[in-house]
Image (cartoon, grey):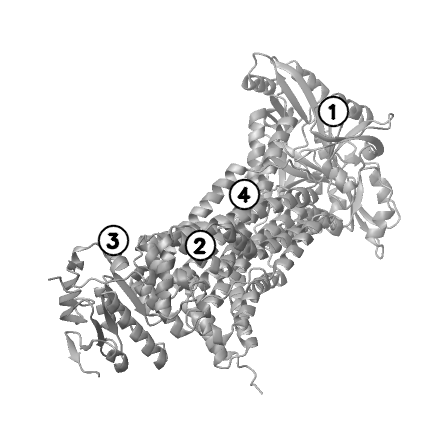
Amino acid sequence: MRPVGSAAPSLAVFGAQLRDRPLRLFVSIAAIAVGIALAAAVYLINESALAEFGRATRELSGTADLAVRGTKAGFDESLYPQLATRAGVRVASPVLAREAALVGGGTLSIEGVDPLVAAQLRPELYGDLAGRYVTLLEPDALVLSAAAARELQLAQGGTLALRVGVGERTLRVVAVLPEGATTRRVGLMDIASLQWLTGSLGRLTRIDLRLAPGVDASRYAASLVLPAGVDAMTPALEQTRAANLTRAYRVNLDMLALVALLTGAFLVYATQALAVMRRRRQLALLRALGVRRIELRLAVLLEGAAVGAAGGLAGTVLGWLIARLVLSLQGADLGAGLLQVQTTQVATPPFALAAFIATGVVVAVAGAWLPARRAAEVAPARALKAGDDDAPARVHERVALALGLLLSGAALAFVPPVRGLPLGGYASIAALLAGGVLLVPAFVAATLAHLPSPRAPLAALVLARLRLSIGQSAVSLGAIVVSFSLMVAMAIMVHSFRDSFERWLGAVLPADLYLRVTPGADTFELTPAEATLLAAVPGVARLELRRTLQLSLARDLPPVVLIARPLEAGAGNLPIIARATVLEPTLPVAYVSEALHDLYGVPLGGSVELPVAGRKVRFAVAGIWRDYARSTGSVIVDLASWEQLSGERRNTEASVWLGARATAQSVGEAISARLHAGDALQVIESGALKDRALAAFDRAFAITYALEAVAVGIGLLSVVLAFAVQALARRAEFGMLRHLGLRRAQVLAMLAGEGAFMGAVGVAYGLLLGLVLSLVLVYVVNRQSFHWTLDYVVPLGQLLAVALTLVAAAALTAGLAGRVATSGSVVRAVREDW
Amino acid sequence: MSAPLLVLDRLVRRFGPDRPAVIDGLSFTLEAGEWVAIMGESGVGKSTLLNVIAGLDRPDEGAVRIDGIDLGDLDDDALTLLRRRSMGFVFQAFHVLPYLSVGRNVALPLSLNGVDERQVRPRVEAMLAEVGLADAFARSPRELSGGELQRVAIARALVHRPRLVLADEPTGNLDPKSATQVLALLARTVRAYGGGGLLITHSRAAAASADRACEFDGRALVPLAVR
């Protein structure tokens, strides 16, 4: 009976080798650490953002059990007495929230409340104002939070000028809340004063309800009969709704981080596999000395686990630091602008952090799995024989599995989204990638078999060497195939997106000038009188007005955007992707975005119910339009129909076409002067608006580009490492060739040739695989995540440039590795036993 | 009268200015057709001597002349070409390339010397027949025993009929019977082609197969009676 724990000798040998090759150890740990760090950073930033959002939500609603919420436009305040007197309601606090445009630029959130009622729900916010309620009731009285006072550089007694309509109003700061009251940047006013100030008489945006003890909030919310577009939500539901807003984007970023991690796993696989190949003799010796197969296997796996644990730990710490840096530099928004909250506190969920470290271990052990099997399979008698330096290539052993995975990958691409996530798409990519990588040896073997035998002795040597070392070559190619194919797929998706986005911008921004109120501000709107003034500005040839507002169509989904604008016949001025052939003739028409079509199951040619002035109105869905600006859904209706149905005559945006000799600058200045709107109204040239949109697009994908670069960098690193390891292992061979009369330059050229060839094969294969993966990304993952379609465009020039760079880098690094290997005592290496 | 095949003239080689010379003023002459065994203690500098003779290492003083050509007058390229054309090497560890067939391994020196491909195969097959591996052209080195691999290495060292063969412990990995066969083969073929050779060995039996044997002590090659 063998004693338990006899893996110790092999572990000692492996440990000694790890210490002996610190660079290899470092690269493997770094590869895992980079992947984990990116995944952890993305996760922690989003967790921090959601935690902050949750805190802000709790702060907002205080101890309320339900928030009855409308959109920005709000709802009629007659709902308040109905709810306040309803059975089961203990406290009802009305709120009007407005984003006020400040004179001098920027906005400030102002909440109008009834301080006496609100103090019952939010004592921490209003407790300090006890005894000063009468002051707060004055029409120009404003209380600032500490954060707002700090940023606006105001103290008690100061004044703040707001832009309201085309005029200005000045408010007095009657108090500044202490730091502990709220972290938000907010102002508080008496609700009646704010209604009066902003022209919102009779309007509310929220009613916070505290229910009687024992009343179930969710059931109570469901029992309420509310006007169209008004929902009752529990704080938990509000949190879910916020999380849903960013979920697809977040999951996509996590998947991208996993790409880097996956490449790291391949690097662990490549280094371990090469190490096992290199150590065949030593492994055989251990076997001959009595070490069991399982012990060898365990030793390789434990080595992988140690690398994974170190990488996981380093990556988690690094990820936390990255998250902290990003939060302090740009807030809790990863570039998509979906969840903009201010926080510098990094969430530190212990289980999640432990899970990241564990992921590092799992990934590294998975990477070491096959090499461990190989280590255990080493036949001692054969491996100990001189001249048997390479394991025989087994290029066809996993072809069936590879084909199975490829077929599964193709099938998984057709799986519908699961809870709004493209899980089938991700599984498809994983299967295609795994199948594709397993086919690499067979692909390389087939390529080499079809190459004619060259006459030049050096080329013949290169080819012969490559043919024999397919196993090693395939291993070193694995990581570059993975990283390059994913890079190709990502590049095609991003390029397709950018190209489609640019064309979409051209379609939706046909005018010369655009006018819009300061983003976020809702204290300024264009009245019919102002629109008439605008149309009369010299140089304005044509004016098109638009009204944009938010609508809530479902309680658990983020609001959608309604755009009321003049529609040409057949909506020829919209980027329509599908039109209905038959419509209910009596209904007004609406064009829904792809996201709205997907998320709400609105059928083309059917109808959609939209809340208009507190009641539901059916619109015929005449078409589906492409909207890259709003992933939560949007709907376009004709402005005239909207004005007729809602009675609203104000607008938020306008497009201006210039006359023959007018310049954008002169007309822009004339408009600003005519409206006296100051900085509350932005006048932007079409080109600048497009540039700004494209810049925002590039910013949003900055993280994607960074992750791509990391993945390719890791892939290239694996090739460098593989070449270095192989070159060092072949020193005696180079020494012999030098004895036979090969110049050093010829040996280096031979190695560079091998590198260039393998690089070219890897890149060509990665390109093919990447094209397949890009189809899944564009048509499945993108479609299911963001609900918009893209025109498939391949950035051929860009991809070829990267491909050539990679091939050159592979050749160069192979040559450099050879330079190191053939320097110094290479001639003495012939004395070493192979 | 033609020049000797190999002349070592007051050869000095040291590794570092403060270290004693490994080769210290050695002079030696090898005539064509001669097969000489060199013995000596481990670490005395036998392999350094072989590297200096092969032009893979430069002496600090003195000269190495092969067929009257002073290696000190040649640059690295010219030395490489000289090695390619005029020298053959046999190593203890065989160094047969596992990714080439036996025939392609043996053909390497011919291909490197630009011999017409139509002449390569017949010459390789003849050489393989000479070393007793007549049917091994297409076989993989993996299929061969240690003795057979060393025969392949000898065939590769001799196929281009080099003037000088340098063999460093060629029988170190072989059993006595194979060792005897390999040594006899080396001596016979080197002489048959009119070249000469140096055999580095620790084995007195191996040294006995040479025309003469010497012991290297760093300064001189002292004649040694081994028979």
Q: Secondary structure at mark 3?
A: helix
Q: Specify the quadrant that holds the C terminus of chain A.
A: bottom left
Which residue, given by chain and number where applicable, does mark 2 sit on? Answer: A463
Looking at numbered disc 2 in the image, what kind of residue is underneath it? Leu
Report whether mark 4 lies on the same chain as mark 1: yes
**Earlier along the polypeptide chain: callout 2 or callout 4?**
2
Q: Chain of mark 1?
A: A
Residue drawn at x 45%, y 44% is A805
Residue that lies at the very extreme toward the left in this rendered image: B1
- Give the crowd class for mark 1: few <14, some 14-19, many >=20 residues within 10 Å: some
Residue A658 figure quarter: top right
Q: Secondary structure at mark 4?
A: helix
Q: Is residue B44 visible?
A: no
The relative height of residue A317 versus residue A580 in the rendered view (above or below) is below
Using the image, tell me which numbered label, if any, was put on residue A702.
4
Disc 3 versus disc 2: distance between alpha carbons?
A: 25 Å
Which residue, given by chain and number where applicable, does mark 3 sit on? Answer: B77
Q: Specify the quadrant that holds the N terminus of chain A.
A: bottom right
Circles 4 and 1, Cβ within 8 Å, touching? The answer is no
Q: Secondary structure at mark 2?
A: helix
Q: Chain of mark 2?
A: A
Disc 2 versus disc 4: distance between alpha carbons?
A: 41 Å
Residue that lies at the very extreme toward the right in this rendered image: A87
The relative height of residue A652 versus residue A540 in the rendered view (above or below) is below
Circles 1 and 3, Cβ within 8 Å, touching? The answer is no
Looking at numbered disc 1 in the image, what kind of residue is underneath it? Ala
Q: Nearer the viewer, mark 4 or mark 1?
A: 1
Q: Is residue A217 left or right of residue A239?
A: right
Q: Chain of mark 4?
A: A
Q: Is residue B31 visible?
A: yes
Which residue, given by chain and number where applicable, does mark 1 sit on? Answer: A571
Looking at numbered disc 4 in the image, what kind of residue is underneath it? Ala
